[in-house]
Amino acid sequence: MAASHPDSGPHHTGDASEVRRGVVVMHDVRAEIDRLQDTVLVDVAEVGFDEASTFAIRLALEEAVANAFRHGNAEDPSKTVTVRYAVSSHEIHLAVEDEGPGFDPGAVPDPTEDANLEIPSGRGIMLMRAYMTSVEIVAPGNRIEMIFRRD
Amino acid sequence: MNPASHGLKITEQDGVSRIDFVERNILDEANIQQIGESIGAVVDASPRPRLLICFENVEHLSSAALGALITVNTKVKARDGQLRLSNIRPQILEVFRITRLDRLFVIHGTAEEAMDTFG
């Protein structure tokens, strides 16, 4: 769990292998979120993903982490969000976990319906689904697992 | 920078309030809230607001930023005003298309084109 990672910095392992992994535990501080994105995106770029891919990864990370802090942790500043990532030359795995009770993704209304177009929230999950190869919200709903695969 | 327009450059041009983002990334929620309030103040200052929001500098934006824009759009409509968006780079335009917000907003390629459409 989050509390078992006292060091919130990224942990690179297996430099001889092809997979770069990291675990980052964050508080709801913009600088920590930016640092996470920069860390992951450096790895993503270094293994050869293009600019459109890094745009997609940044967007998905932004939306997942924002949802985790705002909805999952209900903006409780004492709660953390844990991001695990694994980057290889052909695919990227991201898991974002919060300390909240979870939620039912089926209960989120479709923001692209005409009747919902003017509702100012509720677009994060659909954007992640649009940009990632796969998105799974793991019951009870406090962890989201995403994969981005090279075309 | 005017502290009341944090992260924004606001200029008056031919009866239109033109708003430019200063930052490349419109992601931080507190910042987005301030931006929404600043643009809201521009809308409230006019009986029939005419707004052009120019995205020339913007490389990344979040769904929270889209939400702030939707709120601005609703306020402008309530005052029978006009809102145009312009200079949205292709990657960001794709975000508007995916969310179908390209149907909610009036979007032009350039600020000049947008300026010509105000009635």
Image (spheres, coloured by chain):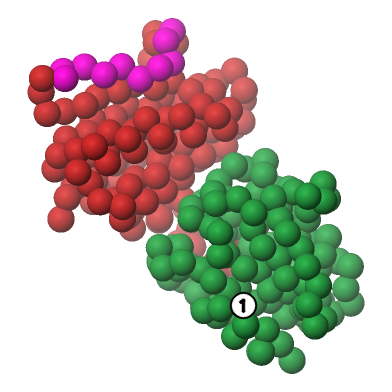
Chain colours: A red, B green
Q: Is residue B69 visible?
A: yes
Q: Quadrant of the N terminus of chain A?
A: top left
Q: Is residue A97 above or below residue A150?
A: above
Q: What amino acid type is highlighted by mark number 1?
A: Ala
Tell me what residue is drawn at x 42 percent, y 10 percent. Answer: A7
- The C terminus of chain A appears in which quarter of the rendering? bottom left
- Above or below residue B12? Residue A109 is above
Q: Which residues are magenta?
A: A6-15
Q: What type of secondary structure mainly makes up the magenta span? A: loop
Classify mark 1: residues with Cα within 10 Å, few (<14), some (14-19) or many (20+): some
How far across and down, in percent of the image, does residue A47 sit? 19, 38
Taking the magenta stretch, the answer to whether it contains residue A12 is: yes
Q: Position of residue A65 (x, y in %)?
A: 46, 36
Q: Residue at x 37, y 51 (%)?
A: A55
Image: A91 above or below A129: above
B110, A121: nearer the viewer: B110
Q: Which residue is mark 1?
A: B111
